[in-house]
Structure formats: C-alpha cells, structure tokens
Image (cartoon, rainbow, N blue to C red):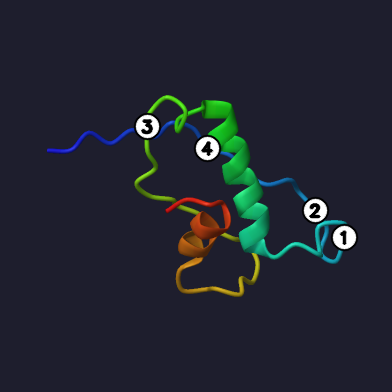
Amino acid sequence: MRNVVIVDGVRTGFGKMGGSLRQFPMTHLAAFAIDGLLEKSQILERGGKVDSVMCGSASVCAHPNVPARYVAMAAGLP
C-alpha cells in the first residue's frame, strides 16, 4: 500500500467577471497558485515530489476535459 500525503492547498484570488484578472486564462491563474504552494511548502527543495495535481474551476476553462494536466504543465511540473 502507498502512503498518500496532502501537503497543503491554495486557491486563486477572487475577482469579478471581466475584472482585473480577465487577461489570465484559468490554467495560468492556477499555475500561479501552484507556484506559490511549491514555494511555501518547499516540497521540491526537501526532496519531495508531486505525483498528482487536482484542480477545479467555477467558470469556463479552455481545457475542460483535463484542466489539472494543463495547470501542472503551466506550473512547470513534469
């Protein structure tokens, strides 16, 4: 059996539809959040690894079938 560990979680900031965050696609906003989480937890510097990424979106996404894959790639994860 594998040990599964959830280190932490993050979310993007709140914004209005068409507001100041409108220039960023959902995948890039989520990638910013993951970058912040990796910096905060320092999991990669400690020799850890990220096996999976889970994400969700309350609005339309350009990659509706597998948004977490595109978010992980945008964040520079393998």
Q: Which image quadrant for residue 22?
A: bottom right
- According to the picture, the residue beneath numbered tag 2 turns out to be 15
Amino acid type, mark 4: Gly
Q: Which image quadrant for residue 71?
A: bottom right
- According to the picture, the residue beneath numbered tag 3 turns out to be 48
Question: In what element is the residue under mark 3?
Answer: loop
Residue displayed at 65% across by 66% down: 59
Inter-mark Cα distance, 2 to 4: 19 Å
Label 1 Cα neighbours within 10 Å, binned few <14 / some 14-19 / many ≥20: few
Q: Is residue 58 visible?
A: no
Q: Which mark is residue 19?
A: 1
Q: Which image quadrant for residue 20?
A: bottom right
Amino acid type, mark 1: Gly
Q: Position of residue 74 (x, y in %)?
A: 57, 58
Q: Nearer the viewer, residue 13 or 32?
A: 32
Q: Position of residue 77 (x, y in %)?
A: 47, 50
Inter-mark Cα distance, 1 to 3: 37 Å
Residue contact at pointers 1 and 2, CB within 8 angstroms: yes
Q: Position of residue 32 (x, y in %)?
A: 66, 48
Callout in the foreground (1, 3) = 3
Residue displayed at 66% across by 58% down: 28
Label 2 Cα neighbours within 10 Å, binned few <14 / some 14-19 / many ≥20: few
Q: Is residue 33 visible?
A: yes
Question: In what element is the residue under mark 2?
Answer: loop
Amino acid type, mark 3: Gly
Residue contact at pointers 1 and 4, CB within 8 angstroms: no
20 vs 65, left or right, is right
Inter-mark Cα distance, 1 to 2: 6 Å
Question: In what element is the residue under mark 4?
Answer: loop
Q: Position of residue 75 (x, y in %)?
A: 56, 51
